[in-house]
Amino acid sequence: MAGKKGWTLWTLKEFLEDKIVQGEARTAERFALSKLAVDAALAAAEKAITAAMAAAEKAVTKAEVAAEKRFDSVNEFRNAMKDQQSTFADKAQTDFRLAALEKRDEVSGGRSTGRNDVLGWIVAAVLFVAAVASPVLTIMAMRGH
């Protein structure tokens, strides 16, 4: 713009206006590029958030399924314990049966003791008779000869 004539007020004004227009164009271009970058970043962030939400939803679903399975196995174990408990005798029933066995043992122990006593008396009587009869038979055998 400043040609052979040199600088005049008019040429300086045109030069400065041209520089201002060029600066505004660069600023507008930078703004447009920044806007594109921000839009791209927002789109990427939105995709990332959507992917993260989908992954979180899958993780929650998997955790719910795992918890459901865990509760099913706990309930199965609980039911097995109930079944097992139902086959066991309870304390009152066990105490009753043990008392009955003890009573039967006492009764049969008394019978056994009674039997042993009678048997002892019989053996004692037989031995007594043998002890008395032996000298008598010996004396009789000596006289008879």
Image (spheres, grey):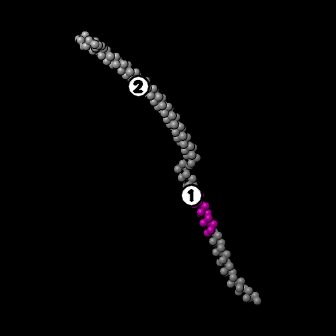
The picture quadrant where one finds residue 42 is top left
Location of the N terminus (image quadrant)? top left
Let me know if residue 115 is in the magenta part.
Answer: yes
Residue 52 image offset from top left, x and y in percent: 45, 30
Q: Nearer the viewer, residue 108 or 132?
A: 108
Let me know if residue 78 is in the magenta part.
Answer: no
Task: Name the residue at 45% across, 26% down.
Answer: 47
Please give the residue where the numbered disc 2 appears in the rendered image.
41
Residue 123 image offset from top left, x and y in percent: 65, 73
Where disc 2 sits, the SS reads helix
Residue 24 image offset from top left, x and y in percent: 32, 16
Q: Amino acid at mark 1?
A: Glu
* Disc sitting over residue 102 in the figure: 1
User: Which numbered disc, 1 or 2, marks the residue closer to the eye?
Assistant: 2
Badge 2 crowding class, 10 Å Cα cut-off, few under 14, some 14 to 19, many 20 or more, is: few
The picture quadrant where one finds residue 33 is top left
Q: What is the span of residues highlighted in magenta in the rendered image?
A: 104-117
